[in-house]
Image (cartoon, rainbow, N blue to C red):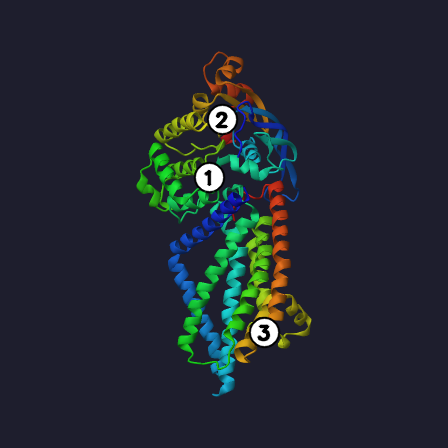
Amino acid sequence: MLVVQVARESQAVWALVRRNFHLIRRYLGWEAVFLFYNVVNTLTIGLIGLAMPAGAARDREVVYLAIGALLWNFLSILFQEVSNSVQWERWEGTIEYSFMAPIHRLTYLGGVCVWAVLYGLVRTMVVLLGVALFFHITVAGADLAGAGMVLVASSVPFIGLGLMAAVLPLLSTERGAQATQVIQGVLLLISGVYYPVSVLPAWIKWAAVLSPATYTLQYVRQAVLSGASMVSLIPVSLGLLASGVVLIPLGLLIFTVAERYAMHRGTLKRNG
Amino acid sequence: MAAIPLDRVALEATGLRKSFREREPGERQWRRVDAVAGIDLVVPRREILGILGPNGSGKSTLIRMMATLLIPDHGSVRVFGLDTVRDRMAVRRLINRVSVEASFFKKLTAAENLAYATGLYGVSNRQSQREAARILDRLGLPARKLHVPLEQLSRGQQQKVAIARALLTSPTLMLLDEPTTGLDPKSRREVQEFILEVRATHDATIIISTHDMEEADRICDRVAIIDRGRFSAIDTPQGLKARYGDGRDSLEAVFFNLIGTTLDEEEDA
């Protein structure tokens, strides 16, 4: 019986991933445009570093900025795809059908998260390819495996944050997506994406410790620019995973409570 | 899953109430509106029950509570003995719903939408495509329409796909919320015939909300007339006409006598 249930839930996860893949295919023109913009945006950020006088410091600055842009690209896609999952269904009017299906909410959100990771990886790889072709910079001694380990670990808490943000369209049809954008903007500001958090004003600097991206960026940069070993990155990776272990169930709990609230108030059916 | 006993009631609603807070544009004050104001209902297995009423009478709210999408303020709904709030997951395996809006991902084809919808219910893609072609052919929609984006199909064609979506999951209780609204007469008749066929071949119980009195008269075993969240009467079409029809063989006369106006006048208001 458990095997049947797991098979059924897995099939639902696959149905969600396949649905989103078909949607991307239908909006391929827009996907190409947004991807082009992503690549160009990352290149322009890296070019800020090229404005420095020639030398090792300049190359380091370009890589520093490129890491910020690439990681933020990946993490923000994760956050957006998860947090906008409900909003998208509202716009299409399909939310009641999806939520009426006999699958656990964890399965539905799990399917969304699987898609978000796959989609984020593909898009980021394309941007990385563009950066590699544009900037002919080698990074000697970089521990790419260690950087990858930190990035994978940071995906978990970011998915948890995305789950919490996905609640907002359930609570307020009109303001949910707006609030999600505000949260993403705050994360961009406090996480040290393009600058060390030490340059932030004192009144906001304290908030940097709350963002998983702060640690991701700091330690990926250490791995790539300073060659920090994989072993030395294990503690921060475990810390990120631990925060995700807290954030994901918390996000799921908040989502479940919000869904029940929407079912009481009758706001589940309202379109965006 | 164990077979459901034949004598089990398909649906039982007890003391059902649901209200919402609403505010008119420009008003500051919120007010509470009773969408469902006390409904008791027993639907035996394999019955086709029609719910007839004007816009705003509570039909969709009632259907949503049956479909586990709305939590009642008071009372309960049980589907084959399972509570729609406490046993939500189990109920969802037994039911499906067709809404008045064609709720699809408009850029996706019918086949892609159906693959997604049935995938959530554990139906394989191959099986759903095969069955979908058969159902849509029965509803008068050619198989090639399966590969056309939904936004390029007419409202009637979209609604046929919606009916196929509901049926592909083999529900024991089907909730149809104005499924023939917007369909041309031929399509409407095809859907009505199909509903009768579904009851016969799939052992399904069907609850259908409708504006169409002729439809209710034609396919429903019983009709409940709903107004302002309450049932004014519930009986077979013949029984309603005999009690409230003033000698006229028409549900419209029944509706007029019970509600005090015609369906058209209600909607114009």
Q: CA distance from mark 3 to mark 1?
A: 56 Å
> Element at badge 3?
helix
Look at 65% across and 41% down and name the residue there: B30
The reply to whether label 3 and label 2 mark residues of one chain is: no
Q: Give the answer, above or below, for where B258 lies relative to A189.
A: above
Q: Which mark is residue B263?
A: 2
> Element at badge 1?
loop
Q: Which mark is residue A231?
A: 3
Residue B13 in percent (x, y) is at: 60, 28
For the residue carrying disc 2, how many other residues have a C-alpha within 10 Å: few (<14), some (14-19), or many (20+)? many
Question: At label 2, which amino acid type do we have?
Answer: Leu
Left or right position of B163 against A101: left
The quadrant where residue A159 appears? bottom right
Look at 50% across and 42% down and name the residue there: A97
Q: Give the answer, above or below, for where B32 lies relative to A145.
A: above
Question: At label 1, which amino acid type do we have?
Answer: Glu
Nearer to us in this view, B154 or A234:
A234
Q: Which mark is residue B101?
A: 1
Residue B69 visible to the viewer = no
Closer to the chain start, of discs 2 and 1, is: 1
Nearer to us in this view, B64 or B241:
B64
